[in-house]
Each structure stands twice: as C-alpha cells, then as structure tokens.
Image (cartoon, grey):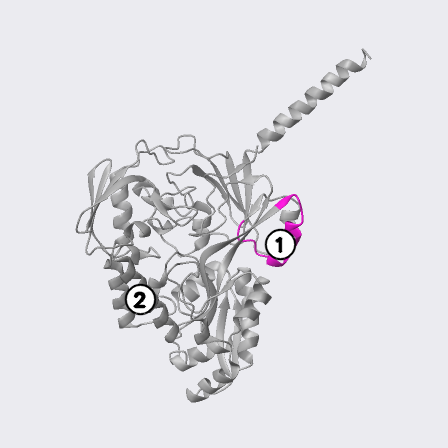
Amino acid sequence: MMTNKPFALGLAGAFALTATLAVAQQSDMTIGQQLEPPHLDPTSAAAGAIDSVLYSNVFEGLTRFGPDGSVGPGLAREWEISDDGLTYTFHLAEGVKFHDGTTMDSEDVKFSLDRARAEDSVNAQKALFSGIESVEATDPATVTVTLKNPDGNFLFNLAWGDAVIVAPESIENIKTTPIGTGAFMFDNWVQGDRIELTKNPEYWGEPAMLDAVTFKFISDPTAAFAAMMAEDLDVFPAFPAPENLPQFDADPRFKVLVGSTEGETILAINNKLPPLDDVRVRQAIAHAVNRHEIIDGAQFGYGTPIGTHFAPHHPDYVDLTEMSQHDPEKARTLLEEAGVSLPLQLKMTLPPPSYARRGGEIIAAQLRQVGIEAEIENVEWAQWLEATFRGYDYGLTVISHTEPLDINIYARPDYYFQYDNAEFQKLMEEVGVESDPDKRSEMFRQAQTTIAEDYVNAYLFQLPLLTVAKTGVEGLWENAPTQAADMTAVHWAE
C-alpha cells in the first residue's frame, strides 16, 4: 500500500495538471468560413467576407449593430441630435488607441468619414455618406457632423462595416495589414488558408474573452463537413452543407443554431442588357423560377421565400411572392409577347457560396423549360466583384445581399443590376429625410411593391444563418443583423 500511495498521488497530480492544461488550451478558437476576403479593407470593397472576419473584431465604427439588430454605441459613447435633425454631436470613448499604439481621436473620425464620402471614394456604400454636409473635429473627443437634410437612418448607416474608423497612417497597407481599434488585433494572413487574430491587451472597452481567433477558409461543403466532424474547427457560421445538419444535431459533440440573416438571395438581372431591358422578359424569368425547388434542392428546406428585396422578419415587409409565382406557361407567353427569339442565350455567373452554385444549377434547368439557355460560368469571388459587380459582364447571377435594410441600392442606376427609375430614386430620397415612423413604413412598402412590379430581379429566399459549433462554445450570434462573425463576447463554457 505504501508503495502505491506515491503513485496514486502522482497520478492524481498528473490528472490535475492535465485538466489545468486542458482549460488553459481553451483560450483560442478556430472558425470556419467559406469565402476568403479579397483583401482586408472593409471601406473599399463590397465583399461581405471582409466584414465577416473584421467587423467589431478588428475595426469599429461610431455606432455598431448588436446581435438583435439594434444600433448602439461604438466608438461614440453618446451623442446629441439638434432639434432640426441636421447636427449630430458625437462624444468619443476615452483612451482609445489603434493597434499600432497611436491615439484614436476626432481627427481620425473626420478623416474616415471624409474619405468615405469623397468624390474619388471607392467605398462600396458611398451613398451612405452622401447626405453629410460637413464633419468637424470640435475637440479631440468630440465630432460634429452636419447633414444636408434630416436622415432618420444616419446612426444606422454609421453602424455598417463600410463606416468603420481608420487612421490616415494605416491606409497605405490597410488591405494586407489592417489596423483598427477593436478587441482583437490582426496577426497573420496565410492567403488561401487562414487569418489569425490575437487579443488586444490594451482594448479600451470590455476585453475579449478569447486570446486568439483563427478564421480558416474552406470553400468546399464536403471538406467543411469533414473538418467539423474531425473537430479541426470549433465553429462554422453560415455552414455551407445544410444536408449535414441532422448529423450534427444528433451528435452530442455539436450544436446547431438556425437563425436569420439580412441576406436577400436573388437571381440578379442585368437590366440594361437586351432583351433583359424589357420588363416582360424579366417577368418571364421570374415566373420560370420555382423558389420552393431551389430552397429544397440547394438549401435542403432552409430558407424563407421572398417576392421583393426586403427581409421577412422586418415589420414593414410585404409578402409579394404571388406576383412572381412559378408559372412556366405564363413565362413562355411573355417571351413571345416580347418578340424574343428562342432559345435565348444568357450568361449566368455563379460565385462560390453553396446557395449560388447549387441554386444556379437548379435555376438553369428551370429556365431551360421556357426556352432560356443559361450558360453557367463559375467564378471566384474576386472575379465576380471585378467582372460581374463592377464590369456588368453578365446576364444573370445568383447572390445574397447581406447588408441590412438595403433596398436603397435600387436607387443607384450604376449599381450592378443597372435599374434606373427616377420615381424610385425620389422615393428613397424622401424616406431618408422622413422621421415619422408610419410614413416611413408606408414608403418602404411602396418601395418593395415598385421593384416587384418592375421585376428588377427574381427574388428567391431569405438566407438563413446555419451555424454548427462545438457544444462548449458560448456567446455566438444566432442571427446575423449584419454580415459578421463577432467574436468579442464568444468564449468556452466553464
């Protein structure tokens, strides 16, 4: 017995040490993501993958979105709005530093907002800042923004990833070495593989609960499933293989979260490309599409049908799906009325996400039934941004718009689907300055109806947020009011 006692104590000590090490090892987390960012500047690209990695984690704005979609304080801790709604006075948080150790103050805010609204701005959401008349650095901790007209969405607009605060000194290398003020700092980018973030030890606000976060890029759904099952990943938001969710749900090692996003998934149409410039042709395409087949086939039943560009969970949503119900016979009649020679050849570009690649195959088969031959071109994200989004080199494309309350993109004639409706543009100007909630709601309903009647695009479904995580992961966003994997409050359960 005496000879066994030291061994037993040693074994107990070893177990204790192992347990301690196990706990210590739970200070980092690996996140799966299907799309890799083309670069790391959220203020100069439309790629949502940039925000997925950096929003709130590395970069912060004056305001920010919460997990419930509400807009709250960010770098601006409080503000006053003048009685006429034109002047916003922002009071900045104290002791904020950029990750390079330099102080963040009102001059950085002025620089960021002026840069975003400048004539030569390449900000993908430049329209968010077009209503700004002037930005004044009143003192180091105070910024005064004057608007041209009252804008009930202004605080909302400032919460977008496109409105984050950057330092003038960081702009030269921001696309590869982002320097923000967030709870995590950029550490390393192995292109084609991963981005590594580390905890900011001098963060001005509530510190992150993790010491390190790695975003691992896995584009193939089968590989994503294998990586999660092998526990190489801890979390995979926007999991790309919904057919595998029942397996994860039945496995005690994992949990499945099914939430909502702001992602209106559409079959986007190039409205200036003949014969797509004829509303009858666009209407024919909308009637040729069977949303339920796409949701079932590409999403395995996950997704809410939509008939316009508006989130179904928004209180002002109007269900207009009946306007574009599946009706192949009507589609053929409309094509005949428009004088279209069949078969009609159209190029359909498909970016990497599973909903686009899988959904595009189904849509192509549906269009073929009415005499439209959609030539599929699978493209990488950077190519989609350059050729489809900026170059208008497409007839059709499948994409999910994950920005919140973004129906105003239809008021931009140079936007990639090139819809030009002066009355709609005027309506969006009016909703921007209207402060009465009931009147704004009516305007949003009118806007939804207008683009549905013009069949600007074929509206498919609202993209769900399907997250697979290890059971010990806590603090994840279940819904996605903006495209972000906010890790600032994520932690391992004790």
Judge by depth and name the residue closer to the eye, 293 or 323.
Answer: 323
Real-space CA distance between mark 2 and mark 1, rounded to the nearest whole angstrom: 38 Å
Q: Name the residue under label 1.
A: 245
Residue 354 in view in this figure: yes
Amino acid of disc 2: Ala
- The magenta stretch spans which residues? 237-254
Secondary element under disc 1, as helix, strand or loop, is helix
* Residue at (33% x, 57% y) in the render: 125
* Residue at (42% x, 77% y) in the render: 282
Q: Does the magenta stretch include residue 246?
A: yes
Q: Is residue 447 magenta?
A: no
Secondary element under disc 2, as helix, strand or loop, is helix
Q: Quadrant of the N terminus?
A: top right
Apparent side of residue 8 relative to residue 194 in the rendered image (left or right): right
* Residue at (35% x, 48% y) in the render: 159
Q: Position of residue 244 (x, y in %)?
A: 64, 55
Amino acid of disc 1: Leu
Q: Where is residue 146 in the image (x, y as percent from the top left)?
A: 19, 49
Q: Does residue 122 lie above or below 77 as drawn? A: below
How crowded is the residue under tag 1: few (<14 C-alpha within 10 Å), some, or many (20+)? many
Which labelled disc corresponds to residue 411?
2
Residue 272 in view in this figure: no
Tell me whether circle 2 and circle 1 mark residues in contact (CB < 8 Å): no
Which residue of the protein is positioned furthest toward the front in this rendering? 438
Q: Which of marks 2 and 1 is nearer the N terminus?
A: 1
